[in-house]
Amino acid sequence: MDPQPRDLAAIVIAVGARPQLVDAVRSLLAQPEPIEIVVVNSAGGDASGLLAAAGIDVPVVASEALLMPGAARNRG
């Protein structure tokens, strides 16, 4: 993880750590402006492991319970 402060931040809301999460995070990492990314995954799955297997190191907040979008944003 890069400890450098960022001007932009994004919370990626995921449910069940689906494989598409990797593409969503890669898309944000590919932006020309550096961005701070936090993934909030709810309803199970191993989002940290999925992202790590793809070589992506971003913070992941996990909840076994399904979070609605507002609750997920608040966690992130």
Image (cartoon, rainbow, N blue to C red):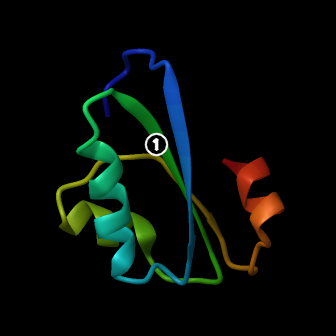
Depth check, front residue: 18 or 27:
27
Tell me which corner region of the image, top left, top right, bottom left or bottom right, holds residue 19.
Answer: bottom left
* Residue at the disc numbered 1: 37
Residue 42 in the image: x percent, y percent? 64, 74
Q: Is 22 rendered above or below residue 31?
A: below
Above or below residue 2? Residue 62 is below
For the residue carrying disc 1, how many other residues have a C-alpha within 10 Å: few (<14), some (14-19), or many (20+)?
A: many
Q: Residue at x 26, y 61 (%)?
A: 52
Residue at position x 39%, y 71% in the image:
21
* Image spot of residue 43 (x, y percent): 65, 83
Residue at position x 82%, y 59% from top?
70
Tell me: residue 76, above or below residue 4.
below
Nearest to the observer: residue 61 or residue 19:
19
Question: In the image, is residue 52 above or below residue 31?
Answer: below
> Identity of the amino acid at label 1?
Ile
Left or right, 9 with reference to 18: right
Dot 1: element? strand
Q: Quadrant of the N terminus?
A: top left
Q: Position of residue 49 (x, y in %)?
A: 33, 69
Residue for point 25% across, 31% down: 32
How many discs mark residues in the rendered view? 1
